[in-house]
């Protein structure tokens, strides 16, 4: 349980207040007999919420921070004889400090880690919700918007009713079986949403409706028949497109003829170069001495120069012809490859049983349309099937919900009947909850729509939840309690006091609760903090002018 709370900002007569100690059952913050406002009752309840992981204490308390300044709230949770001490500051609310018994920080954790710790230590693990989502709707403090007398299970004004009822089942430990069905429904709905969005953005093209679907079926039959005819005609060799194959063969034969002619010209050029090389084969001689025996006056040096010239011309001609021969032979090799390729194409064209290019193109066009229509109808079928699955899962889920709600509803109503009789009298109408479905419930005090009766019903509902479910805390502000008849308030306080869980409540004008104008024993026994004008939570009230304020006007 939450065993104590303390802050150096809480003052009494200029001194820091002692830590406020709590106990099981009722923990009462009492205001003055004049019902004075702005003394800190609500703020103290919000400080308790702050200690339990809430944020309204700082989010809705701009004036408090402005006048008091940032400060640290210290608190402890006790389980058996073991106390766990923590602190949390208003300027760093997302950090929670672990402390020793004197509130000296030993380490720190995140707010998320702290609330997870609360979930674990208060036995809420496995229920399918966080500590705050399960507990805070029952913290009915001004500023938290949890005082809807028609929807006692609501957490935020934007919440769907189904979320209220999920919370109810979780607190009773009866949601686990339905969670799987909820997940299946959510998964199908997510897929259907993705399908609709994809269709809207033209990412897919499903069939629009049943009439389009039937027309597509007829078109698919016609397209299938046409494709079968093409395949059949081709296999039998009777297709009207055989002329296209003949035209292709003629083109190939003409190309082959041209290639062969080029090869013949190259072969002729190769032969001519070979002959030229034989012709220019120059045979040199070195025997000019014999010539001189016949012509003693001849100039042998001149003959040697002419001989050298002929050798040089011969080498140049041989190189040029050799280079040209090499190029011609490479060109001929390339032509041989082209000729072989065309010959193979002609051979394939003559032996193939496949469709011609024109047939393939026609078949492909038909197949494209066929596939598009088939895909459109397939998407339509899948969407219809998912619709059937969704309907079936919702029926199954609603049956499971109905079974659980039928268990919880009489438990709550019987408990509220008993509690209401104890708090009021046997003739006063008790609050009633009607759990109509997974998405609808009604809460009311039948035949009594008065404000006081409705608040009485709200608080009795919370007491029933504390008694029957895993709810650990309730916080009730004086704003709601003051709406209820005095004698009924006293009865509700008695119910609070009988609990082994914790209720934190604020109340004022306690002397009006009895005919003798005395403070009831239940108040004296369970009062943990008394506030009044001059004894405000922070030691002063900033909504009252001071002498300094008046002098500045």
Image (tube, rainbow, N blue to C red):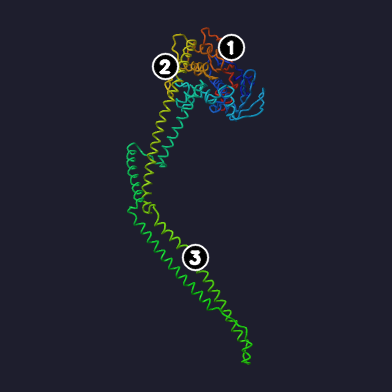
Left or right, residue 253 beside residue 318: left
Across and down, in percent, residue 281 comes to 55, 78
Across and down, in percent, residue 276 comes to 51, 77
Determine whether the residue tagged by mark 2 lies in a helix, strand or loop. Answer: loop
Q: Residue at x 52, y 26 (%)?
A: 129
Q: Residue at x 36, y 53 (%)?
A: 358
Name the front one of labels 1 and 3. 3
Q: Quadrant of the N terminus?
A: top right
Determine whether the residue tagged by mark 3 lies in a helix, strand or loop. Answer: helix
Instruction: Mark 2 and mark 3 in contact? Answer it, CB < 8 Å.
Output: no
Residues 291 and 195: in front is: 291
Determine whether the residue tagged by mark 1 lies in a helix, strand or loop. Answer: helix
Q: Which circle's residue, 2 or 3, is located before the other in the chain?
A: 3
Left or right, residue 48 beside residue 204: right
- How many badges with numbers are in the image? 3
Image disc number at residue 165: none
Q: Residue at x 54, y 76 (%)?
A: 317
Name the residue beneath numbered marker 3. 333
User: Residue 521 sits in which quadrant?
Assistant: top right
Across and down, in percent, residue 323 comes to 54, 71
Residues 88 and 10: in front is: 88
Query: Within 10 Å of the Cα at label 2, are there few (<14), some (14-19), or many (20+) other Cα atoms?
Result: few
Name the residue beneath numbered marker 1. 525
Whether residue 359 is visible to the viewer of this picture, yes or no, is yes
Query: Within 10 Å of the Cα at label 3, are there few (<14), some (14-19), or many (20+) other Cα atoms?
Result: few
Residues 296 and 373: in front is: 296
Q: Quadrant of the C terminus?
A: top right
User: Residue 204 sits in which quadrant?
Assistant: top left
Name the residue beneath numbered marker 2. 449
């Amino acid at each position: 349980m939450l065993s104590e709370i303390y802050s150096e900002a809480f003052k009494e007569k200029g001194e820091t207040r002692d830590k406020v100690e709590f106990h099981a059952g009722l923990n009462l913050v009492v205001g003055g007999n004049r019902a004075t406002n702005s003394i800190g009752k609500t703020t103290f309840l919000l400080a308790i919420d702050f200690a339990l992981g809430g944020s309204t204490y700082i989010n809705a308390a701009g004036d408090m921070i402005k006048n008091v300044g940032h400060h640290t709230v210290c608190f402890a949770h006790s389980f058996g004889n073991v106390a766990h001490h923590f602190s949390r500051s208003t300027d760093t609310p997302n950090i929670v400090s672990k402390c020793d018994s004197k509130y000296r920080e030993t380490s720190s954790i995140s707010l998320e880690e702290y609330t997870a710790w609360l979930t674990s230590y208060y036995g809420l693990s496995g229920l399918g919700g966080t500590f705050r989502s399960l507990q805070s709707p029952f913290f009915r403090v001004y500023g938290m918007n949890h005082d809807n007398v028609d929807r006692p299970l609501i957490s935020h004004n934007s919440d769907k009713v189904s979320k209220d009822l999920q919370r109810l089942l979780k607190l009773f430990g009866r949601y686990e079986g339905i969670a799987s069905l909820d997940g299946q429904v959510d998964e199908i709905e997510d897929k259907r949403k993705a399908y609709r969005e994809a269709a809207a953005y033209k990412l897919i093209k499903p069939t629009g409706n049943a009439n389009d679907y039937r027309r597509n079926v007829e078109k698919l039959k016609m397209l299938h028949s046409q494709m079968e005819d093409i395949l059949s005609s081709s296999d039998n060799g009777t297709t009207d497109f055989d002329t296209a194959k003949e035209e292709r063969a003629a083109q190939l034969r003409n190309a082959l003829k041209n290639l062969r002619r080029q090869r013949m010209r190259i072969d002729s050029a190769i032969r001519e170069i070979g002959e030229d090389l034989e012709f220019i084969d120059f045979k040199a001689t070195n025997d000019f001495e014999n010539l001189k025996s016949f012509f003693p006056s001849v100039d042998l040096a001149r003959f040697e120069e002419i001989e050298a010239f002929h050798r040089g011309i011969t080498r140049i001609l041989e190189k040029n012809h050799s280079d040209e021969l090499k190029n011609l032979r490479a060109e001929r090799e390339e032509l041989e490859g082209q000729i072989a390729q065309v010959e193979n194409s002609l051979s394939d064209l003559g032996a193939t049983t496949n469709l011609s290019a024109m047939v393939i193109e026609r078949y492909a066009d038909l197949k494209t349309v066929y596939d598009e229509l088939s895909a459109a109808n397939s998407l339509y079928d899948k969407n219809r099937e998912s619709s059937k699955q969704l309907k079936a899962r919702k029926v199954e889920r609603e049956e499971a919900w109905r079974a659980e709600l039928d268990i919880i509803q009489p438990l709550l109503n019987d408990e509220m009947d008993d509690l209401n009789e104890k708090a009021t009298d046997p003739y006063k109408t008790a609050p009633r909850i009607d759990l109509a479905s997974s998405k609808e419930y009604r809460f009311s005090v039948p035949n009594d729509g008065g404000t006081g009766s409705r608040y009485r019903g709200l608080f009795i509902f919370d007491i029933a939840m504390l008694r029957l479910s895993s709810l650990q805390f309730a916080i009730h502000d004086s704003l709601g309690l003051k709406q209820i008849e005095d004698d009924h308030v006293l009865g509700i306080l008695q119910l609070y006091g009988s609990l082994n869980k914790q209720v934190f409540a604020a109340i004022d004008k306690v002397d009006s609760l009895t005919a003798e104008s005395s403070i009831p024993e239940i108040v004296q026994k369970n009062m943990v903090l008394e506030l009044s004008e001059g004894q405000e939570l922070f030691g002063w009230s900033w909504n009252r002018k001071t002498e300094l304020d008046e002098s500045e006007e």
